[in-house]
Amino acid sequence: MISTEIQTLDLNAPVTTVTLLEDRAQVQRMAKVTLTGGLWRVHVAKVAPILSDKSLRAEFSDRISGAKVNDVRVRRQMLIKESDRSGLLEELMLEWRSQFDQYNILTEDRQQLEAQFQQIGIILGKALQELPIDAAWGKVDPMAWRSQLQPLFQKMREARSEILNTYHAQAKLKSAIERLVSRIQAESRPDQMFAAHLEADLAIAETGEYELAFDYVVPNAFWRPYHQAQLQMGDKQTGENSQLTFRTDGCVWQNTGEDWLNVDLVFSTARASLGTEPPLLTDDWLNIREKAKKIAVEMRDQTVKTTGLGTGARPDAIDLPGVDDGGEVRTLRASKKANLPSDGNPYRVPLFQFQSSAKIEYVLMPEIALQVVLKSEQTNNSTLPILAGPVDLVRSTEYVGRTTVSFIAPQEKFALGWGTDANMRVQRTQSQKREKNHLTQWNTITNTVSIFLSNIGDETRKITMTERIPVSELEKVKIEVVQDETSDRIQPDLNGFCNWNLHLLPYSQAKVILVYKIAAAPDVEGL
């Protein structure tokens, strides 16, 4: 028979597993305890005050008959009155705004002083240019020169001194702002305002050792994939024997009010907030209108899908999009336990890595950028997909920049860009010539694209260069390459891309010409 007297116990139930979602986290606490038969009320201290009450549940993990969880709840206690806390935060925010405004004022002052310093330098340079001219005309007066130039030099010294003083003042103010931001973040932690603990009412039939699990969901925690690619170059001329090491981390932020120490992390792409309701349907009206007598055409850019190949070479700005899982929920486990304090700072946790042989080549797309880019093509040899996210680029042991990749499935090829070649110079010019056939009334536009390349380095460069021509979707607009005037008599592919394989010796130049014609019928407008 179970005793009706309730016994209390402070239970040590540390966080053991955290499942991180796109905008929240599910926390699991585990505890092993020996309990005698009867009613128990156990307490678990220092839990996240912002946990979702509806998500809280407790259960015995071993499913022993005769042991039951009657109820579980969270108790919160205010540590600082909201009025006091609001006043402190408001005071800190006012001080931060004041210091930030002062920093901006100093920035404007320094910019003005730098502009003044530059103007004085221009005036002084012009004055010095006039001295040889005066001397050539026999007007040699050192005392007059000194009286004219000495005030300019003095103003330059004063301006430079003020610039340095402003710079040092900004540095001190920046340190003060950073300390103030740290104080604001510390005061904004949930556990600085509330203390929370869990209470669970248990009914135990017989004495024994029990394992109790607590699960709940907390906001203020999320993760995003973050990658690092390290390239070991092989032969500089051919790029053979090059190896790429690709590592994927989970970058985690959390400010839940509880520290996660020595926990197992599970990274999930599930979106618990997404509903399953179908979209609302609206009427789609169809109208009939008379066919236009003239055909209006326009140019548009179309992205050519490459199934992952080349998607990693985009120098887009780094943002924080949602997790792209390719339409299938993915679950990734951290390779080791992690410590994640509740401070809102990012922490990177290793997930997996792989190695792949890399195909190295130098590519040039003059229409997009007048720079030769080092490109590597490799395969995702991992059994897991690479999720969309930023990539830190490390060439040998040197950090060279950052790029992004899209979703890349296992065993799929993808490309990465490793920066520009400083030894290559590129110039691109374009001209047009319009003609009209008086017999057929067709209009013809002849486009000539000239690309000039210079290798100023002491190494041979093999470059894959790509230019493009428009692709017509209309019978009344015809586009063709003039082979006799185009270098190497290149013909475009179905997407309009023309590719050249160039070989530039050290300290040499090359010229590539592309000529194509656009012919349009008389009733075509917009060209």
Image (cartoon, helix red, strand yellow):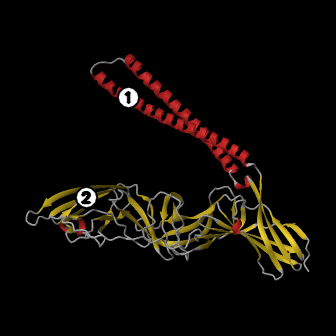
| Residue 354 in view in this figure | yes
The residue sitting at 43% across, 25% down in the picture is: 152
The N terminus lies in quadrant: bottom right
x and y percent of residue 102 in the render? 57, 36
Q: Which residue is mark 2?
A: 450
2 and 1 marks in contact (CB < 8 Å): no
| Up-down relation of residue 315 to residue 124 (above or below) | below
- The percent coordinates of residue 506 (x first, y second) are 34, 58
Q: Is residue 49 left or right of residue 425?
A: right
Horizontally, is 11 left or right of 427 in the view? right
What amino acid type should be assigned to the residue bearing mark 1? Answer: Ile
Q: Label 1 belongs to which residue?
A: 123
- The residue nearer to you, when weighing 422 against 202, is 202
Relative to 229, residue 137 above or below: above
Q: Residue at x 7, y 65 (%)?
A: 439
Q: Is residue 221 left or right of residue 315?
A: right
Name the spot of residue 172 as percent of width and height, x first.
61, 38
What x and y, as percent, mark residue 471?
Answer: 27, 68
- Residue 111, label in figure: none
